[in-house]
Image (cartoon, grey):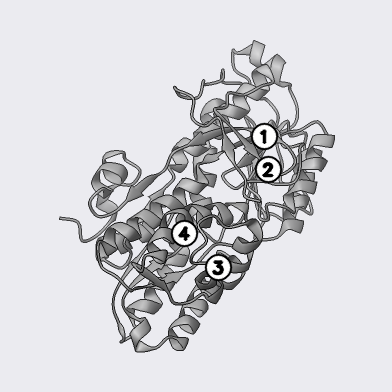
Amino acid sequence: MKKHVLAVLLAGAMILGTMGCGNSNSETPAGTSGEATENSTEDTNNTTDAETLGSSGIQVGIVLPTKDEPRWIQDETRFGEILDEAGFSYQVLFSQGSSATEKTNVETLVSNGVQVLILCPQDSAAAASTVDYAAENGVTVISYDRLITGTANLDYIVGFDSTSVGVAQGNYLIEQAGDTKDNPLYLYAGATTDENAFLFFEGAWQVLQPKIADGTFVIKNSTEAEALSDTAELTREQMSTILGQITTDWDFEVSKSKAEANLTAASAADKGDVYILAPNDGTSRSIADVFAIDPDVTSYVITGQDAETASIQYIIDGKQSMTVLKDTRILSKAAVDMATEILNSGTATTNAVYDNGAGEIPMYQMEVLSVTKDTMQEYIFDSEYYNAADFTGLE
């Protein structure tokens, strides 16, 4: 069954919690299998918050999936900047693609006295037992960006409207195809262990399926998707079958190998001017590099997600067509604002509810933006997400 987001988007922004101060020192824990960033804070004049928040242990613990993707390194930096300014003691750990390491990281943070855990899971379902462990030890858990399923012990979710990511990607492909017919369509998806991968694909399928059914697009690399091309709303089992065939595992090399295999199996007639649904920027660049060198591919339009610096340059250079911007400055700040509210008042502001299969979890949800050559100046440079001077080829 697909998951539903309810009561979405109340008016107004998240209420900022009163900034707290911690005075506890954190040391690198012996034997931890993740990589850590530690911060110590000094006492300030805000003694009320110091008394409220406690005088020992790490107040905020953050567990991110991997250091191998630019996205999570950016998040680590932004978390550090925001938490330093807020005056919290904190620790950032990386799970390096392992749910077992993720659980060890959480156990380490719990032993260090963490009060609020911001967790971006490696595996949406496997993280449930880790959340249960944290909850049993009195830790408030926030699911960050990626969704955690199968546990009612999850306290909050902070993230973007994941379905709308796929809608934006699908709509971009449709806009570029225009009124043409029989356009080759290659589908790729994220990891089947990531709930967001299903929601991204669900959103894309929602808008692409009618255009597949009317002949605008012809699926070329998934027999499972092709067999369901007349099905507007896929069941979870049907999506699982398709994703099992087109998954990239969020891995650059897997993406490259899958694209190479797809093009090797395709005839020249299955190429020409192609359209490619790629789930994020890392996979998009890997897939684009493969399609770019195939002599039978005349042109390609390809999607992305996360607005990574390398992909912004790819868009400028004409190697990638678009990316979905989920402004991680807003996301990381929203997570810290939520942690601040929890530490000071015990509850946090939300604007939606997400059914994670075990309960309806309060969520703070944000919207996404489509970045192309036409919108890049406004969304990326005018907003100071990146500095234009760091890129080449701009007029």
- Sort mark 3 into few (<14), some (14-19) or many (20+) by Cα contacts within 10 Å: some
Q: Which residue is mark 4?
A: 280
Rendered view: 308 above or below 360: below
Name the side, left or right, on which 99 lies relative to 38: right
Q: Quick one: which residue is furthest to the left in this view?
A: 395
Report the amino acid beneath label 4: Asn
Mark 3 and mark 4: span between their CA atoms? 10 Å
Marks 1, 4: nearer the viewer? 1
Whether residues under marks 2 and 1 lie with C-beta atoms below 8 angstroms apart, the answer is yes
x, y (%) of residue 113? 77, 33
* Residue 369 found in image quarter: top left
Report the amino acid beneath label 3: Asp
Element type at marker 1?
strand
Q: Which residue is mark 1?
A: 361
Q: Earlier in the sequence, mark 1 or mark 4?
A: 4
In which quadrant will I find the C terminus?
bottom left
Element type at marker 3?
loop
Q: Earlier in the sequence, mark 4 or mark 2?
A: 4
Q: Which residue is mark 2?
A: 356
Q: Which numbered tag is attached to residue 251?
A: 3
* Picture residue at 46% right of the left edge, 56% below the top: 204
